[in-house]
Amino acid sequence: MSFVQKFGQPVKRSGVENYLRYTLISFACSVIATRLFLSLTDYPSIGNGHLHIAHVLWGGLLLFSAAILPLIFSNRWIYSLISILAGGGLGLFIDEVGKFITQSNDYFYPPAMPIIYASFLLLLLVYFRLRTPTIQNPRADLYESLDDIQEILDHDLDEREYDKLSQHLKNVIQNSTDPEYKKLATALLHFLNSGAIQIVPVKTGLRRRGLDLAKTFETRFLGYKVTTILTTLCLLTVSLSSLYDLYLFTRSIFRPAYLDQLILKLVNQNQIAQSISEVWFLIRLGLEGVVGILLLVATYFFLKKNEKKGLALARFGLLVSLTMVNLLVFYVDQFRAVSNTLIQFLLLLVINHYRKRFLPYHTIGTNP
């Protein structure tokens, strides 16, 4: 008997995108907050002469809590909590990866930050993969229906959830070849439409209100021209910052003495790791310079009113930087590379939003 025959084919959980988003945010915040706190407090040690309570233990405690809570409670809201606990625990755990992979328990081991960053990218890849719509089938519809019925038990079924649950049950009735599935879905749909269920108004949470305010502000103040100007300025600023690295790369190639002085200066300012080699430092400068050129060309296309090419080139440059170049940047600059990564990620979100909002109009030659 195969695994699938014994345990059943896996079904994607309803709302998994939200849960993974919480995990990603919690993961990133725990690493950034931990490193920032340790840096500001000069890396204090919790313990005494014999004991040292590392924050990896707190990470393990959060991960243990995330593992045991769904075994104890059946409530649907528990998944949001365990998503946050899992992300925070993973961040605290992997933040000390340098100690785990070195004989000297070196927290500042240069490859540690690239490993942390790569772990975040892998989790981000899983998130984007699961955001892709999957082909529904009667079995998956019934799974999701049984999951959504928990809202009825908590007297928290709103109008949107009612419509979604009703549609899933209708899909089972119409498409299933299993008479038992149809019988169960019919009974549930009859119960749903019996009038005995309390339907609550759709709640407007803090996130939803924030998005609505942002949408209102965008519609009123950020039209096509203003948004294009701001996007162009952001691209130009980030590209010039990266092109400065290309200038340093070119100057270092032709003047080796300048390279030695530059590395010594940056090491003294704690901007790069002391153990970094000149070769890796030069590669880092060169790759960031290439990204700067791509973004500068994208800016040129924006100025020439060819947003389609500009957006494509900007997305390519930012994705190359975020997924490949920054692994080396974190190796060279350690934690200080976080700010540049956040800026590039935010710019990528701006580019994607711009394309979604304006590009369809320009592909047919109409201004919004």
Image: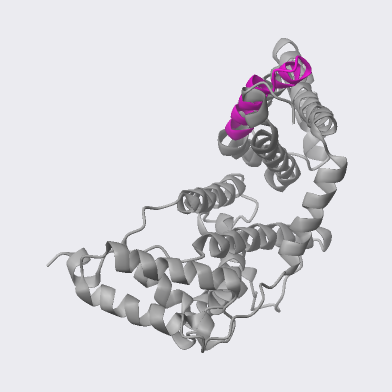
Question: Observer-nearest residue: 28 or 138?
Answer: 138
240 is within the stretch colored magenta: no
319 is within the stretch colored magenta: yes
Question: Observer-nearest residue: 115 or 154?
Answer: 154
Relative to 314, is 273 above or below? below
Which quadrant: the C terminus? top right
Question: Observer-nearest residue: 100 or 12?
Answer: 12
- Number of numbered discs: 0
Left or right of 195: which side holds 304? right
Residue at 77% across, 63% down? 209
Name the magenta segment's main secondary structure.
helix
Residue 29 figure quarter: bottom right
Left or right of 40: which side holds 97? left
Q: Position of residue 180 (x, y in %)?
A: 22, 77
Residue reaching furthest to the right? 221
Q: Position of residue 233 (x, y in %)?
A: 83, 28
Q: Position of residue 264 (x, y in %)?
A: 78, 32
Which quadrant: the N terminus? bottom left
The part of the chain drawn in magenta is 298-320
